[in-house]
Amino acid sequence: MKLFLGIDDENFLRTEKIPMTKREIRILTLALAQANDAEIIVDIGAGTGSLSIEAAKFSPDGNIFAIEKNPDAIEVLMKNIKKFSADNITVINDEASNALKNFSTIDVAIIGGSGGYLEKILDNVDEKLKIGGRIAANFISIQNLSTCLDWLRRHENYHYDAIQVQINRLKKIGRYDIAQAVNPIYILTATKND
């Protein structure tokens, strides 16, 4: 089976108001989450759907659920799903806490946005995440990373790791190639042990 990762950012439809996870971060997030063997993947705070679509291509036999509460993001997300023919994605337009109640089990939970309800989302994910299941969370702010780390320390049945990633892309300016930085991101992965 051919695994596919790394769609160019420019290929996704997007708007200024809807954040999008960049290509290199999508690749690392899905690889660290070991999403290629997952049956049920939920993408919480799906935004433009870039991570959901990458997950759909990376795990073609999996069922991907893109959870997003913002109606403007839903519109862009649906257009991207159609553009990439990602037929194994189901869009759920709801708050994450409500949407997660409808799952019996989850193999991988990807958290991109939490709307200020990160601990509640983690509690809801924990109830549905199977043993051996994985959480992959992307954070721009140290505060959200700290909230997640505090939650994991209180839940000792998780083994976790976190990295900070700084990507620089070369951009041609005249006859020179100049490094342009992409915002640094924290990627936290955790596995539920029991």
Image (cartoon, rainbow, N blue to C red):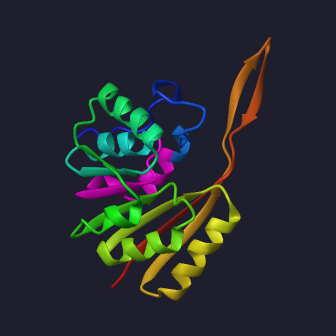
In magenta stretch: residue 67:
no
Q: Within the image, what quadrant is residue 3 found in?
A: top left
User: Viewer-proximal residue, 106 or 119?
Assistant: 119
Looking at the image, the residue that sits furthest to the top is: 174
Looking at the image, which residue is at 31% across and 56% down? 41
In magenta stretch: residue 46:
yes
Q: Is residue 32 above or below residue 16?
A: below
User: Viewer-proximal residue, 169 or 51?
Assistant: 51
Would you say 112 lies left or right of 103 here?
right
Looking at the image, which residue is at 34% across and 57% down? 42
User: Viewer-proximal residue, 100 or 58?
Assistant: 100
Instruction: Evaluate whether residue 193 shows in this view.
Output: yes
| Quadrant of the frame with the N terminus | top left
Q: Is residue 175 above or below residue 171?
A: above
**How many numbered dots are placed on residues in this image?**
0
Residue 82, position as x, y percentages in the image: 30, 28
Would you say 24 lies left or right of 54 here?
right
Residue 160, position as x, y percentages in the image: 50, 74
| Quadrant of the frame with the C terminus | bottom left
Looking at the image, the residue that sits furthest to the front is: 71
Residue 86, position as x, y percentages in the image: 27, 35
In the image, the segment drawn in magenta is 26-48
Looking at the image, which residue is at 46% across and 46% down? 70
Q: Is residue 128 above or below residue 115?
A: below
Residue 175, position as x, y percentages in the image: 80, 12
Instruction: Evaluate whether residue 131 shows in this view.
Output: no
Looking at the image, which residue is at 56% across and 72% down? 148
